[in-house]
Image (cartoon, rainbow, N blue to C red):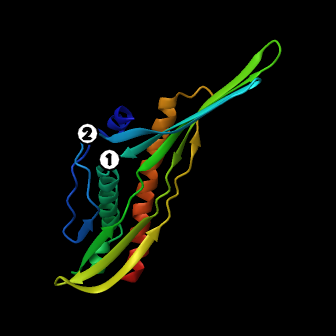
């Protein structure tokens, strides 16, 4: 998993600086150089006379620097395209984030049915995100004093994906991570879209 993430994101990024009119605060960021950590979840095995079934899971936790930088870059760039600085008219925006989506589970399922002269087996993988909506508290500041405060919540649109026929586990995981990046960017833009009408 770490190798896939490294291919997709490169080295684990340092936390990006906020812009001159947007300050982004987040929970503590991992200092690890690993793009992710993984550990075994549960495992099941059902042996029967005519039927075998096994299920194993691995829980992966992305390095928090990855979603934080994704959110920071997207918000600053999108805010610029929406003319947020002009709408603030000299004021500044402070965003404080809670948890971000960064955990998902890989599940491997295997089944085998025994008949008199032959057997049938099936095997597949699927990835399931741990749903994590983004909740942001915001402050609009003038001369370092708040003129308005509020909260914004954006739903996590992530969905489980299942391994396709002739698709490798690596390709399936790569597709999931690309969708993950796309979803985090979309959620970040929605935050700005929800805040602008409140200014």
Q: Which image quadrant for residue 59?
A: top left
Q: Secondary structure at mark 1?
A: loop
The disc placed on residue 77 is: none
Q: Is residue 17 above or below residue 114?
A: below
Question: How many C-alpha atoms fall within 10 Å of the one at disc 2: few (<14), some, or many (≥20)?
Answer: few
Question: How many C-alpha atoms fall within 10 Å of the one at disc 1: few (<14), some, or many (≥20)?
Answer: many
Q: Which image quadrant for residue 126?
A: top right
Q: Which comes sooner in the sequence, label 1 or label 2?
A: 2
Q: Position of residue 180 (x, y in %)?
A: 45, 48
Which residue is at the front of the view, 41 or 87? 41
Q: Position of residue 67 (x, y in %)?
A: 35, 53
Instruction: Give the labeled residue for mark 1.
Output: 63
Q: Is residue 155 above or below residue 57?
A: below
Instruction: Give the labeled residue for mark 2.
Output: 11
Which residue is at the front of the view, 10 or 115? 115
Q: Which image quadrant for residue 39?
A: top left
Q: Secondary structure at mark 2?
A: loop
Q: Nearer the viewer, mark 1 or mark 2?
A: 1
């Amino acid at each position: 998993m770490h190798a896939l993430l490294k291919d997709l994101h490169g080295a684990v990024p340092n936390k990006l600086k906020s812009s001159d009119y947007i300050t982004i605060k987040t929970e503590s960021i991992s200092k690890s150089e690993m793009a992710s950590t993984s550990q075994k979840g549960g495992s099941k095995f059902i042996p029967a006379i005519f039927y075998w079934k096994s299920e194993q899971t691995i829980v992966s936790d992305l390095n928090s620097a990855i979603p934080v930088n994704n959110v920071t870059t997207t918000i600053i760039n999108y805010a610029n395209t929406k003319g947020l600085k002009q709408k603030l008219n000299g004021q500044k925006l402070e965003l404080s984030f809670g948890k971000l989506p960064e955990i998902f589970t890989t599940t491997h399922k295997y089944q085998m049915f025994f008949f008199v002269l032959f057997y049938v087996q099936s095997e597949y993988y699927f990835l399931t995100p741990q749903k994590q909506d983004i909740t942001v508290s915001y402050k609009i500041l003038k001369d370092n004093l708040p003129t308005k405060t509020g909260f914004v919540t954006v739903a996590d649109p992530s969905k489980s994906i299942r391994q396709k026929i002739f698709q490798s586990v690596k390709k399936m995981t790569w597709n999931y991570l690309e969708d993950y990046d796309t979803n985090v960017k979309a959620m970040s833009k929605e935050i700005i879209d929800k805040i602008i009408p409140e200014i």
